[in-house]
Image (cartoon, rainbow, N blue to C red):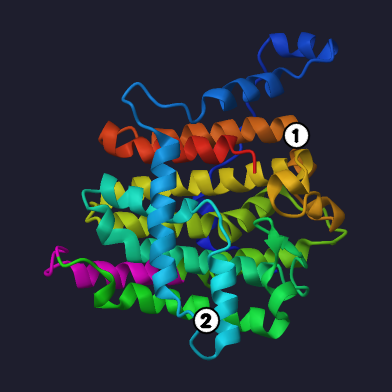
Amino acid sequence: MAAFHPLVASRVRLATPLLPAAAPAAAAAGVSFHRRRFSAIVAAATAPAATGFDFNSYMGERAVAVNSALDAAVPAGEPPAALHDAMRYALLAGGKRVRPALCLAACVVSGGREAWAMAPAAAVEMVHTMSLVHDDLPCMDDDDLRRGKATCHVVYGEPIAVLAGDALLALAFEHMASLDSYPPDVDPAKHTARVVRAIGELARCIGSEGLVAGQVVDLEMTGSTETVPLDRLEYIHLHKTAALLEASVVIGAIIGGGSEEQIERLRKYARSIGLLFQVVDDILDVTKSSEELGKTAGKDLASDKTTYPKLLGLEKSREFAEKLLSDAKEQLADFDEEKAAPLLYLANYIAYRQN
């Protein structure tokens, strides 16, 4: 196999934490110490902070705004109708809109306005939806349930699903590049250069050195008799999952006019939460039902994929998730506390989500 891309050199490394002294006794008594601690943190994960930040309202309002932008961006009822219907079906099927929210929040914490980043936020969601449509295809993960609904290829057939994904990818870049996608108060002297840089960032993170690279290595490892080492599993998920989360955050920071230091801090934050997202996804896959997840549960186990619980065990995977969350929060320490609140709460949400 070809050498891994240099991105892996800066990955978050697994450091196995020492178990608290009480853990062995608790385990002997049949009590899971880490499960209890994890559950206790979950209960407070999205509670309003002392500053009055309401995470649920924040996410709900951003989802409404992003959905409106997505609805307006994709033609409805125009020929070829089957293609546009499939694009809209996949794109407007629900979803938490985590990546757009990260993009918007990163723009604000870097000194910009949310409105400046709405077009890039919509674009990353188009790319994300494309990746889901393609990932669900029979030749890939072969899934028939996504966001609680039949997957795009089940409803529209494989050829249209492939083309709908292709069209969403093209539309994402068109939407980001169009001057009409941005409000009139952007800095005319700097906006064009920022958009060009942001487009390059998105292309890099989803191409043969990013999302696609992770997907390829994941496919190569699925069903393999070879024992997948931890660093290769980390490579897969830093690219397949974390890369687009990284793009979402970094693009927001670029459009917001962040300094190079701010952009790199936010990049490190994004890589931590990106890997965290996948670790939690792996945990949920073996602890939740299909009804709770809105997608097929136990799919990784059935297809003999290597996951963090399979490699580390469930409790060590939870410990790793807590370490990644701590690393992400550390990168936010030097930002304005009020402006950074959405990013802090988004990290908590990713760590403690239940679907």
The quadrant in which the C terminus is found is top right
With respect to residue 248, does 50 lie above or below?
Answer: above
124 or 82: which is nearer to us? 82
Q: Name which residue lies at 62% across and 34% down.
A: 320
Labels 1 and 2: the sequence-earlier one: 2
Q: Name which residue lies at 76% across and 49% down.
A: 290
Q: Regarding mark 1 in the picture, which secondary structure is present there?
A: helix
Magenta segment:
185-203
Q: What kind of residue is marked 2? A: Ala
Residue 289 lies in the magenta stretch: no
194 or 18: which is nearer to us? 194
| Percent x, y of residue 131 | 59, 68
| Percent x, y of residue 56 | 45, 38
Q: Main secondary structure of the magenta part?
A: helix
Residue 199 lies in the magenta stretch: yes
- Direction from residue 190 to residue 84 in the image, left or right: right
Q: Residue furthest left?
A: 189
How much space separates mark 1 and mark 2, taking CA atoms? 39 Å
Residue 3 is at least partly visible in this image: no
Q: Which residue is mark 1?
A: 314
Q: Which residue is mark 2?
A: 167
Q: Residue furthest front?
A: 77
- Direction from residue 160 to residue 249 in the image, left or right: left
Q: What kind of residue is marked 1? A: Leu
Which label sits in the foreground, 1 or 2?
2
| Percent x, y of residue 157 | 73, 81
Q: Name which residue lies at 46% across and 26% down.
A: 47
